Image (tube, rainbow, N blue to C red):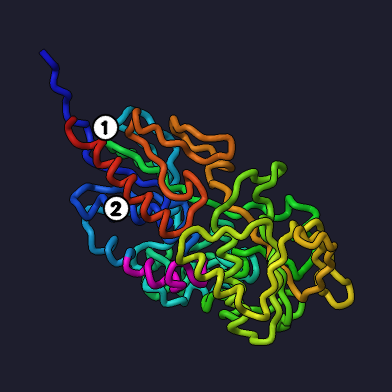
Amino acid sequence: MTEEKSAPASGSILVVGGGISGLTTTLEAAEVGYEVFLVENNPSLGGRVAQLNQYFPKLCPPTCGLEINFRRIKDNPNIKVFTLAEVEKVDGSPGNYNVRIKLSPRYVNENCTCCDECAKACDTERPNAFNFGMDQQKAAYLPHEMAFPARYVLAPEIIGTDAAQKCKDACPYDAIDLDMAAKTIDLNVGAIVWATGWEPYDATKMDNLGFGQYENIITNMMMERLAAPNGPTQGKVFRPSDDKEPESVAFVQCAGSRDENHLPYCSYICCMASLKQATYVRERYPDAKIYIFYIDIRSPGQRYENFYKKVKEDENVFLIKGKVAEVSQDPATKNVTVVAENAVTGEKIHQEVEMAVLATGMQPTAANTTLPADLKFNTDGFMMNDFAKGGMFAAGCATKPADVVSSNQNATGMALKAIQTLVRR
């Protein structure tokens, strides 16, 4: 006689990470009736996509996709969102996990209407992490104009200071709560999806490429913020040293990727990101010259290949097959010289440009953060799904470098895997 398996102890799903993969996983599961807890360690949802100017395949702004998803979350009673939240502990087995979550204080409650009075009263500024430190923001701030939840945050470093009290006194809605404290909550869930995403590889680790040493060398994610209308320059692409409109820009591919000393793998999206960013510059400055130094141009799929061909036809875009050996800066003009060997002609190239963009690779967030669960990782820090064991799954860029479309497809699959854990077998 075969013993019938009992139903799981919980019918809920925990999704860790509120980027595009986490949002998709959450919505796919919740909209077919499952209770989902979404945990994000930042004060708002959206992840890396929220920082982009445009994203493939349609080159639309983040508002195009994120606002719809935020509305779907807001309207769905099956979804509970926790921001400024971190998973501290996971115990149990598939179908029955006990999870402890730490909630850090926002110091702003649900009364907030985003009136901005607290920020006007705040006399303390801090580097704006959303813009990769390229500008300053008040210590009472809305993470960005599309933030969800739409609620201000007080930076913890001002708590206990006159600046915090000024914010509280200025708020007409009694939304500032300086007595908020960290707390923990315990959840019982049947499945967990880890959508912990990615972070740009630290460009300062590549001494030969000059990031952090020379003012006019930036990363590809910094370029996204410069080009974004809600970025530090309101969408104007200026070079950092003097706010000059650049007449020439070099893109350095595989900055840290495909390098055994840094990230040994291809980061998948960097070639297309640089081709896209070349169009940012060309659209703004019709006479600007673009130089793209590459090992191989990887444009997976017909749509990306067509985009590559279109950019390549631009007479002001020059593609040079050669890995950049070093980058230097002229102290007088602040211009940058990129040195590489042309792999086709054998010629050593010294190309002077007004600014350079490093196409830094995608590193999984989990590579630099210890996750408190029984998870498998490869040598590069990406999670490896154990479908035989089930219960806990990784989605999106937590498993490999991917674009938005691939991340969404994968996240939909992981939502289904999580649901399968919950049903009677």
The picture places residue 228, in percent across and down from the top left corner, at: 54, 75
Asked if the stretch drawn in magenta spans residue 63, the answer is yes
Q: Is residue 341 above or below residue 418?
A: below
Circle 1 residue = 95
Q: Nearer the viewer, mark 2 or mark 1?
A: 1
Q: Nearer the viewer, residue 315 or 205?
A: 315
Left or right of 190? Residue 371 is right
Quadrant in which the N terminus appears: top left
Q: Is residue 162 visible?
A: no
x and y, in percent, of residue 397 in the image: 48, 49
Q: Which numbered marker is on residue 80?
A: 2
Q: Residue at x 35, y 40 (%)?
A: 192
Secondary structure under tag 1 reads: loop
Answer with mark 2 or mark 1, whichever residue precedes in sequence. Answer: 2
Residue, far right: 332
Is residue 56 part of the magenta span, yes or no? yes
Secondary structure, mark 2, is strand
Amino acid type shown at disc 2: Lys
Image coords of residue 369 (percent x, y): 55, 41
Residue at far bottom of view: 286
The segment highlighted magenta reads 51-68
Q: Looking at the rendering, in which quadrant would you find the C terminus? A: top left
**Three-letter residue code for mark 1:** Gly
Q: Which residue shows up at 21% across the image and 39% down it?
A: 11
- Most extreme residue toward the top, as rendered? 1
- Residue at the image point whose x is 72% and y is 66% from the top: 320
